[in-house]
Structure formats: C-alpha cells, structure tokens
Image: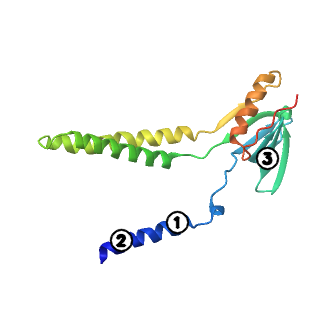
Amino acid sequence: MKYSLVPAVAFLMMISLLCQPLAAAKERRGSMVEVTMTDGRMVRGELLAVKGHNLIIHDKARDQGFTVNIEQVSKIWIKKKSQFLSGLASGLIAGVGLGAILYACTTERDGSLRAFALVLPSFAAIPTGALIGVLKGLSVKMHIRKDEPVQIEECLRYLQKHARSAHIEPSQE
C-alpha cells in the first residue's frame, strides 16, 4: 500500500508545480546606475533602456523617469549586487561533487586518504567559489570621453546589456 502512495504523491506534486501561473516568473531588472552629468548633477536609478544616444533611467525613490543624452554624461557607475552567497553555494556543490568522485576512486584500504578525498576538495572549492562571486559582483565605473565616438558606441553597447529592455536600437548619428 505505501509503495503505491509514493508515486501518487510525487505525481500530484509535479502536476501542482506545472499548473502554477507563468506570470509569477520574475521579470528581468535593469542594473542600478549612478550617472554624473558634465554640469555636476547626478541621476540615480534603474537603467530601463538605451535608445540611440539616450539612456532611460527610473529613480524609484522619486518615482520619476529621466532621459539622459550620452553627450551630457561624464561618468557612469553601474552598481552590481554581490554574488558572494551564490558563489559560495556553487563552490560547495563543486567541492562535494569532486570529493565524491575522488572518494569513489580511492580503494577501501586507503582509509585516511579516502576521508581526505571526500573533505579536502570542499575546503578548497568553497572559498574559491565565494571569491569568484565577489569578483563578479564588483561595480563598474565608465568615464565617457566625447572626443572618441567609437568609445561612446562601445559604452552604449555595454550599457544595453545592463538595461531592463532587451531591444537594441541603432544609434542616430
């Protein structure tokens, strides 16, 4: 009786997960940016889109949107969230996986070596994963030089990757 109950419960759980509304999926968010204008003003908010040479930024605190022309910008700071915990978890998973493989490769007579094979990779991979997560989460500062149109186009393409909108429009010269 209990053996036929387990597949039935698993089937019901799978059906209930598949019937969840797709609207609950989290939409892509734009990166938080801090833009310093040539006149010293600062605009902070979420980068919604890059359209031509304009950046569309929404300041959630003021509930106000801004359109900023790249020609009026001197510096852009893209703020990223730290990925320390996800890196830590990835390191743990990689370390345990590698440890399990090494554990399976050692023989029964290598008792103490077998225990080290299970634990040692985890101790090496966890801090490595955390460090990779920290490095991926470092903020980026971009200084805009108006005398180099190629550099401005590069900046716009890079910013497009961090905008909420995935639509790329060609820039108007």
Say which mark, if any, is on residue 57: 3
Give the distance between the C-alpha atoms of the residues marked 2 and 1, in whole angstroms: 17 Å
Q: Quadrant of the C terminus?
A: top right
- The first of marks 2 and 1 along the sequence is 2
Residue visible at 52% across and 66% down? 17
**In the orientation shown, which residue stands out farthest toward the left?**
109
Q: Residue at x 44, y 68 (%)?
A: 11
Q: Residue at x 20, y 42 (%)?
A: 114
Q: Secondary structure at mark 1?
A: helix
Residue 161 sits in quarter:
top right
Mark 3 secondary-structure assignment: strand
Q: Nearer the viewer, residue 19 or 141?
A: 19
Up-down relation of residue 146 to residue 26 (above or below)? above
Please state the horizontal and vertical placement of residue 131, each as a whole percent of the image: 47, 39
Image quadrant in which the N terminus is located: bottom left
- Quick one: label 2, few (<14), some, or many (20+) residues within 10 Å? few
> Are discs 2 and 3 less than 8 Å apart at CB?
no
Would residue 82 be visible to someone looking at this image? yes
Nearer-N-terminus badge (2/3): 2
Residue underneath mark 2: 6
Residue 125 shown left or right of residue 60 in the figure: left
Q: Is residue 3 above or below residue 57?
A: below
Mark 1 highlights which residue?
17
Colour scheme employed for the rendering of this structure = rainbow
* Tag 2 secondary structure: helix
